[in-house]
Structures are given as structure tokens and as C-alpha cells.
Image: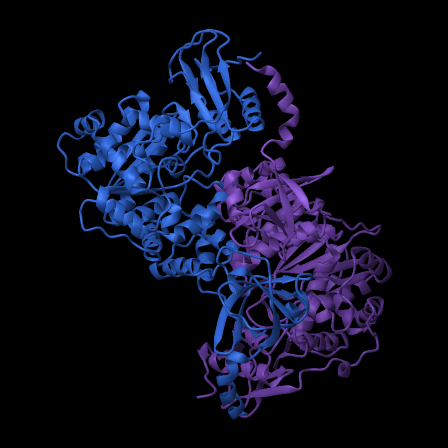
Chain colours: A purple, B blue
Amino acid sequence: MRKKDWTDSAVSQLYVGGKMFKTKKLDLESGGTLLAVMNIADCESMNLNPSDRIRLSWDEDEIVVILDSSKKLVNIGEIGVSEDVWGNFELPDRVHVFPARKPKSLAYIRKRLFGEPLKKNEIETIVTDLIENRLSSVEATYFVASAYVQRFSPEEEETLTKAIINQGKILKFDRKPVLNKHCIGGVPGNRTTPIVIPIVAAAGYLIPKTSSRAITSPAGTADVIEIIMNVEMSAEEMKAIAEKTGAAMVWGGSVDLAPADDKLLKIRYPLKLDPLPLLVASVLAKKVAEGSDTVLIDVPIGRKVKTLDEATKLGERFIELGKRLGLKIRSVITDGSQPIGRGIGPSLEIRDVLEVLQGKGPEDLKEKSVILAGHLLEMAGEKRPFKLAQELLESGKAWKKMKEIIEAQGGDPNLSMDDIPIGHFNWDYVASADIEHLVYNSNTVAQIAREAGAPGVKGAGVYLHVPTGGSVGKGEKIITIYAEDETRLNCAISFLKENAPFMCKKTVIDQLV
Amino acid sequence: MRKKDWTDSAVSQLYVGGKMFKTKKLDLESGGTLLAVMNIADCESMNLNPSDRIRLSWDEDEIVVILDSSKKLVNIGEIGVSEDVWGNFELPDRVHVFPARKPKSLAYIRKRLFGEPLKKNEIETIVTDLIENRLSSVEATYFVASAYVQRFSPEEEETLTKAIINQGKILKFDRKPVLNKHCIGGVPGNRTTPIVIPIVAAAGYLIPKTSSRAITSPAGTADVIEIIMNVEMSAEEMKAIAEKTGAAMVWGGSVDLAPADDKLLKIRYPLKLDPLPLLVASVLAKKVAEGSDTVLIDVPIGRKVKTLDEATKLGERFIELGKRLGLKIRSVITDGSQPIGRGIGPSLEIRDVLEVLQGKGPEDLKEKSVILAGHLLEMAGEKRPFKLAQELLESGKAWKKMKEIIEAQGGDPNLSMDDIPIGHFNWDYVASADIEHLVYNSNTVAQIAREAGAPGVKGAGVYLHVPTGGSVGKGEKIITIYAEDETRLNCAISFLKENAPFMCKKTVIDQLV
């Protein structure tokens, strides 16, 4: 037994199996994940496979990266590294490469994919590895997918949400309560946030809120608000504005709160996996990270949840998790079967919002905003909350508060409607017969606005001349499409003609034949 | 109503929303998938998100690629393309970029992730999109993961397997039956294939077979066989050799049969997702593509399936799917709790194999090979199959057939043991006391061989001096580790000392304290 050899080797074991490689910078970016590429022949001789981990070591430094193999990108003896590596580490010309162990979270993800619940420390390890970019996109996808095998238990969901929150900044305010609202979405034109927030702030409450940009819809709240004020700022700037005005309306992507959630969102996007197992954790992680303690959830029945039963269950899940996170929380179920407001598309929607704040505008948007604001005021302890919300809006106090917020966020509080241009290529869809009880097809209306260029093209979208359930006479306008160039306009028109944008008494009316 | 505009636009719609971009070749390879990278500002202005599809159009040509976004790799106005794009298409300096629809298979994958079974055409579409590189790795991962939400029904499994088979070449032989065998693996040293095949071929039957290389084990059958003959060849070469000698032993990766299965295997690797929902489809797709009609499945109870119940269920799934594919199929359940043979590692294992073929060698390896060959001969219609298998082995007829195969596959049929060098750095583990009923820990033994360098280092591995259940006296050798360099040897020794490689009467013996 050559015991001495072994003793010596225990020290040098870190370098066992290592080989020297010449480094090469690759034009390869992977959202933070550290990747390296070795020639397939080197992989074979080192017993390495794609997705294995390797340790790159030089001088006093070392990093662990995820391996891929290639026949073409790198020669034998070369190691290619992604931008996430060479942009963040000063790699020398040559590095030692060693096999490394895979992160423990892979065993946990595997376990959960087989339907076994995870322990607290296992979920925390996964979220830590995710945020520290130790998982490949395939591996992270298995974690998301595991939520479909077996829905997260309330305990798992609580742990996951807290882990997501703790892996990022958390805003703290001195005043209480800190109010917030969230709508699960799916309703075109449903821009209540920029009305609810100034109402609630005008009542003297604190309501800082982040919003998202559109992913598959014609406009997200952040896309709409940024027409009249800056929505991209740091969490610290957001906090300062909220402390000054009582409110803030910010794009969630800029404040970097709950970044682990952003990573999971990116993986859910390809299959549009919403509203789903991870939705509740995702939404409430953001709210807690924003410093909120009192949260109203708007669950519209329509596109994202289809029945009252589904909406009730989803609302209950928000309440269960919210309570576990120590929030005062309420879910309200609303009618999301029809567009709300008249404009669909960023500029058209902010015009509706400003009109409502100035005492005019679409009745349905005004009514829904007052109800939501009323719920929030009630949760804050107000005795006549709905009446108060209505008074604050109708008296112009909410509009005054909105101007304060606009100014604090670098916008012009004295803007007029003319400052919000609408695409000057437009086309009217007029009724070829008298129609009663007109009912829109939300999916089609939303897609027409997207075909016209919304949300990327701010002035593009759709204006609905007839309120839901309304009537229109032959020759009168039903819908106007706005675009900023003729090809996009034509594209939207053609989509409208191929897809019924509304129905009447449940019969599809083909106005064009 | 400006009907004319619309009519004109219907024709030009293909070009609506398009922008001209300057092309840039990226050092980015993605296993066939066509990828492009645009600056994040361009993505926003075109309403595009990562994982969306875009169409690149130039002259008379166009391709659809998967989009990613970057702030750094490409400037505004540039589009970066992966090697899979620039290596396969002659892209000009500038291309038109248009939004494109996502493939239909994403909706089907989404549906399945929610637990809904898929129709025939839906599964076929997914496999087609997979093989034509239209899915990102994240999207394909959701498909694999969907098998954990709801196991594929027998009908789905049949459709999936047939789709995998039909998306590649299928070998056809004039003679019948075409025999084959497969072991689900997990047993160190279990190298029955190069013994079973010459026995069966010596009986006059046709048995062409592909094998895999090791992924996580210390040796795959292809790694072992290639020490004495060439195992990398085209499907046509494999067929020619089988028609000449009655057999062929080929690395599955070289013949490109059932390539869709290889793509799924790559996605299953990071989490080591075997033996699992896709295993049965994966194995039988390969067998059918190899032209087999009569297949024996070896299901060892040990590492991959742990209980007789699990093994029985897995065996039954092979039989059910095999019958649906028109195969004559049999599953045998074997004892996989212990290593089989004495050598573990490519060179050590081929030495065991050659010894058995020459009438010597480890008894357990010989016995198992004869039983498996006997089952195959019985399925082929032989009346005294097990006796026949034994006679063919003991008479030297199987060894004569093996020499024919070696010669046909470019090896030296007159090779001697000295032609198979074993690593000359070695270390003996000797008993510090008398031991009875020695039982190995297969996981540890396999890992020691890997630490020593197997399978990449052919001569590395472990030799077990004591057969399972055997006894050893104080001072006698139990295990010898072989390596081709001292650092690897020390690494294996240190692993052995930290992990018990065997037990005695269920008590871990720590020989070193």
C-alpha cells in the first residue's frame, strides 16, 4: 500500500485531471450564465459532455462554467468562452480546465420533476443557483415544468416566493400602509392603474407601483404611462418619488426587484405559460419586494381565466400565499370579457386615462377604476371608501395628484391631448347595416392593434366608437385603426377583414361580404 | 372604406413590418437550431421578444430563425447569426427581417404540459419541428418534461416512436428474423453484447446491433468494442458487414438512425433523466430503425430500477410498445445489484470478453451471456436454445465468428491480450483482515473507475480480484486500480478511501482505519 503517494495527492487533487487550454472570446451571450465551448475531441478525452460543469483556473482565480462542445467553433486545445465570462473576468491567454461537480440544485429539480415536494433548503438552493447563473436554460426549464407535474404546495410556494424576494433588493418605507394593486391582465384597454393610483394617493395614502411592458398584448401599463412621464428609474429613485408624492408608476424591469422572477418569466415566455403555477408567486414576490403590505388583486374573467370557478380559485390562491407572506390582501373578480375604455394601444389608452382624470372619458374605465380604488381605500381603513374614491376623481383632486406625479417623474404636467399624437394613417370600419347589442371579440381587437404596430409604435392601435352592448346605425363608424405607416395599416385592415372583431347577439356579422 | 388599399396590401403583406439589417457572423453554435441575435433596441421597435421567430429574406431566399436579444453583441441595425445559419446559408451583407409566426408545435407542447393527451398529427408535428431544428432547447425541454406531468399513453407512445423512426433512415434486410438485444444499463462490467452477438451469429442468425458510448458510466459497449475493431461507420457499411458476417457491432452515434431520439437524449442528459417516460420509446425507435424484428430487453434490478415490481412494470412497457411496433419482443429481469465480470473500464472489460469467448474468463459474465443468447435463439425458433448457446460458446464457434466480425470491422482477428494494454500506474487494495461474503457497492466501484480516467482513458479502470460473495484472506488483493498517469491514479485512490467500495455481511468494512 503506497500510502505516501495518496497523502501527497490529496493536496494536489484539485488539479487532478486538469489540462491547459488557450482561451478564445466567443460572440455568445446567455443572459448571465457562464458558458464555455471545447472541441468535441477534447471533451471526449476528458470524459466531458455538454452541460457538464468545468472549472477554469488561473493565477489565484477560478470560475465554474457550463460546458458545450463544438466541432467547428474552437480547435483542439482551445476553450471558447461566452461574453458573460470574458465581459466579467479578466481571463489570461491560457487557463487550466478541470472537471467540476454539477450544482446540487439539479438533483432537487430532478426530484421535483418526479412529483416529490421539495424541502425549504432545496428550494432556496435552486433559487440561489438560478440567480447566480449556475443553471442552464434547459435545467431551469425543468424546474418551471416541475410545477405542472405537481402544483407547488402552499408551503413550497411560500418558500419559493420568499427565496425570490430575498435574492434581490427590498424597498422599505417609513409610512404604513403601503398599498399596491395588480391585474392578471388579458383585457384590452383596461388601463386602471394610472387612474386608481392618483385617486388613492390623493386620499393621502402611499401607493408606489411597478408595472410591466406588453409581451403579447397591444400595451402594458408601463408602455402607456411612459408616453407622458419617465417610467425607467432605479428602486431608490422610485422610493424618493413615492415619499414625495405618495405614488410612483415605474417599469418593473428597470428597478431590478425580484430578479429571480425575471429569469423565470423569460423561461415561461416561449410557451406563454400564464396564468399558471408560478403566476401567484411571481406577482406577490414583486409586490413584497416593492415594499407593499396591502395588495388588491384584480382577476378579470375573460381571456386568462375563463370561468367564475377558475377566477375564484386563482383569487383564493393569491389570498392564501399573500397571508403567508404577511400581506393584507384581497382579490376582486371582474368582467374581462370585453375591452375596457375606447382606445387600445399606448397613445390611445393614455388619452382615455387623461380624459377620465379630467372628468370625461369612457364610463366603463371610470367605473372600474373607482371600484378598485374604493377597495384599496377600504383595505386602508376608510369608512366610505367607494364614495371617497368617486369624489376624489370627480372633484379633480386625483387629476391634481396625477400632475404632481407626472412632474416628479420628469413629465410635463401641463400637457394637452395634442401632445399625444395618434398615428396619422387611419382607416374606418363602418357599419353596413344597423346593429344592436354589439359585443367585441377581445382577442381580435387586441391583435388588430398589434398588427397596426402597438405597443412598439406608440400612436398605433384601435379606437372603438361603440361601447360594449351599444348600437350603431348603417354607415356609422364602429372601429378606427391608427398606424404610423401605410403598410402596417394595411396589415391591420387585412387582419380585421379575416377575423371578426365583434359579434351581435352571438352571431358573427361579416360586414364586408 | 378604402377597399383598394387593402387589396393591394394583401399581396405585400409578406413584407409588412420588415426592416433591413446588416448581417454579422457570430461564434455561436446550437446543435442545428437556427438562431439570430438583434440589438435590444431593434427588438423593442419591432415588438419582438427573445424566442420569437423572425424571417430573414434576401434575393429569392428566406429562412425562419429563433430570435435572441443582446445589448452588446450586435449594434443597432445589425443582426448576428449563429454558425448553424452562416455555415449552411450564403447570407448576403444585408437581409430583410420580418416577424414570423411561432411553429404550431409550441401550442401542442403547451397543451401536453397541461396534461392533455396529444393527437397523432400533433405528436408528428412536434417531432418534425424537432428534427428540422425549429424548436429552441427550452421549448424541446418542455416537451420532454410534459412526459412527467402525464405519462404518454400507449397510443401516444406508439405515435411518438413511429414519428422518431420515420424522421430518419431505416435499415432493411432481406433475411428474417433480424435479432437485437438491449440492456437498460447501470451494471458495471456487464459487457454481454460482444459475447451474445457472436454466439447468435454463430448459430446462423442475423444480429446487427448499435451500442452507445458511456455517458455517466465507466464504459459503454461502443467504448469497449472499439479497442479491438472500428465501431464508427455509416448505416450502409453496417448493413454490408451484417449481411456478410451475420452481425455488426457499431456505435449508434455514427449511423445516424433515429436522429430525433439523439436530440431528445441530449435534453435528458443534464438531469440524467433515465430510466424514464421516454426511455422505452427511445430504445425501441433505435431498434426498429436498425431493421430489427425480434428484440430481447435485459432489465437488471439494481441501480436504474430498484425493485422487482419496477423492473416488471418496465419490462411490460417494452413488450406493450414493442408489439404495437410489430416486434417480437421479450423482457428478461436480471440481477443487477453487483458488477458482472472482473474488469471495469474499456480495456479491462474487453479482456474479460475475449477470455470468455476463448473458454476462460469470469463465470458470471459467461453465464449471463449464455442465458441472453439462449433467449434470443428461442425467440428465433430454436428448440434447445440454451444448450445451443452454451455449445456455440464452449466449442469455440462463437470465438471463430467473433474473429470474422473483428476482421470485417477492420480489426486484427489474431490479436493477443498483450495488444490490449492496461494502464501501467496501478495500486492494490489489500485486505487488512479475513473477509467472507464480500459484496461490492456498484456505484462506488463505477466511480473509482471513472476517477481513474475511464472511459476516455482506455486502459484506466478497476479490476475486482474477488468474485461477488467470495472470500479473501488478510493481505490478499481485493481491488486493483489502473490509470495512465499518477495524478488520476491518486484521485481514484482517494475516492476509494472516502467511499466504501464493498461491504461484508451488510457491514461497511473500513480497511484503512
Q: B135 or A497: which is nearer to us?
A: B135
Residue situated furthest right in the rendering? A244
Residue B143 placement (x, y as % from top left): 45, 53
Residue situated furthest left in the rendering? B383
A83 relative to A231, above or below:
above
A297 relative to B344, above or below:
below
Residue A64 placement (x, y as % from top left): 64, 41
Q: B336 or A23: which is nearer to us?
A: A23
Residue in the picture at 83% in, 74% down: A413
Q: B236 or A332: which is nearer to us?
A: B236
Total marks in image? 0
Q: Is residue A141 left or right of residue B468?
A: right
The image quarter containing residue B469 is top left
Q: Is residue B219 left or right of residue B95?
A: left
Q: Is residue B442 left or right of residue B96?
A: left
The image quarter containing residue B367 is top left
Which image quarter holds the N terminus of chain A? top right
Residue in the picture at 31% in, 25% down: B355
Q: Can residue B376 be seen?
A: no
Which image quarter holds the C terminus of chain A? bottom left
Residue B277 placement (x, y as % from top left): 40, 44
Residue in the picture at 70% in, 71% down: A224
Q: Can residue A239 be seen?
A: yes
Residue in the picture at 66% in, 67% down: A220
Q: A390 or B381: which is nearer to us?
A: B381
Q: Is residue A116 left or right of residue A344?
A: left
Residue B23 placement (x, y as % from top left): 60, 69
